[in-house]
Image: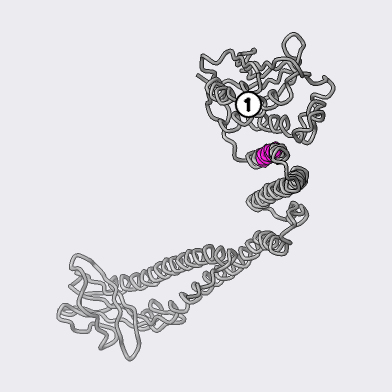
Amino acid sequence: MTAAPRASLRTRLLRHVTLPLLLTCSLGAALAVGIAAYFTQRAFDRAMLDDAYLLGAHLVQRGDRLALNMSADDIRTVLYDQSEQVYFAVLDAQGRLVAGHAGLRAGPDGDDSSEWHYTDLRYQGQDLRAVVLRRSQPAPVRIIVALTTNSRSALLRQLVLFSAAPQVALLLGLVLWVRHIVSHDIRPLSRLQELVESRDAADLSPLPPQALADAASRDVHGLASAIDALLGRVAQGVAAQREFAGNVAHELRTPLAGIRALAEYGLAQRDPAQWREQLQAVLQSQQRASRLVDQLLAVALANEASAAVQLLRVDLAAISRELLLRLLPRADKAGVELEASGLDAPAWVMADPALVEGLLSNLLDNALRYGLRPGEPGYIRLEVHRSGERLMLAVSDRGPGIDAERRESLKLRWRQGSEGVRLGAGAGLGLAIVQRYAELMRAELRLDDGDDGIGLRASVAFSPAAA
């Protein structure tokens, strides 16, 4: 089942703004017309009531009969109206006509306590508006004054026209202005959509600034900035993947070719001793390839972790003790003496446990591989201590060390020290991984001379965690 097409943001905004605006203006116009009609009606009704009072003031008692003490000209003058026909009737208590138009009668009186009331009636085929006035002097009498409603209807129509028409014009202008403003503010979003849709999948460059130069809304610029940031993160991820794939292809080509050559040579021999020798060489090449893969994965992890790493309260001493215990068999096999200090008491720092473990593993591995002097017993010292406001994790060896002028360059990828080149091992990634992990945890890697100026001391300064 196909989903119904969704309305555009422009349409929704216009609908949500225009409809309440139309409703509000319509209610306002209706209220204004109602108020105008009410006060127009009161003005005409008050004029009729004044005429009724004037007629009542000229009633006199003549014997046993009432009479209207006004001439025909006086009556025409009092009840004169330029645009309406006026009718009147004066009725005594028995309903007999005293003066006026015969047949002009009003319905039942209103509230008995009221001296007058207004009513609508029909007389001689015309709709009339009438007022009925009750007087008790000089005798009980009812005075009815009625007139046609043409002028008041015409006046009401004029009021409606002159009050509603400007409002309609203003409303129409307001709707057009709102539509223009909404369209103008939405246009950068449409342009942004076109830019994103027209982009090639491989184009991860930032959006051109001139494309949103006329966007007045902070939200549009915020959305564009968020898209640029997303494109930047995707570009970094793609670059890291490409770099990782290229590094793997380049660095594994040599050990894999060596393994193949060793295997082919071994298969061509018939002496079991030769087979054993070749298998041992294959094992060494495989170990080097495995370590290289682990380091390349660590580099890729460091690149990807830059946006997701969360620093937690970590016990540096506990992680160091655990890794040191894992390293004991390998150190014993290599004849290396391990020494540790500062691991008995907790050392709380703000770090990532996995990154701390990877960092320390690389430092210890480098010390075991390159921190030994030919013909001399190996020695590695691991210590955790406080230096000023920082907590230090340090690994020292008594190997050949690194020249002071080359220490900073060895923190970059694919840079090997002289000992690594001499041994033909490694790829120049260990210290680069340590440097990157330290940066992600806001720590600092330092390379100095070892104890008594012998060997190398690699230390990482961490920020202590709050108690």
The answer to which image quadrant residue 148 occupies is bottom left
Work out whether 168 lies above or below 101.
Answer: above
**Residue, x 49% and y 64% (percent of image)?**
20
Tell me residue 441's x, y (percent).
63, 30
Q: Position of residue 409 (x, y in %)?
A: 81, 29
| Horizontal arrangement in the rendering, residue 467 relative to residue 400 (left or right) | left
Q: Is residue 80 magenta?
A: no
Determine which residue is flagged by label 1. 360
Residue found at x 19% / y 65%: 113
Q: Quadrant of residue 273?
A: top right
Q: Main secondary structure of the magenta part?
A: helix
The answer to whether residue 390 is visible is no
> What residue range appears in magenta?
283-300
Residue 58 showing in the rendered view: yes
Pick the residue in front: 420 or 309.
Answer: 420
Q: Is residue 323 above or below residue 198?
A: above
Callout 1 secondary element: helix
User: How many callouts does the rendering have?
Assistant: 1
What residue appears at the point 61 percent right and 18 percent down from the top-left corner? 391
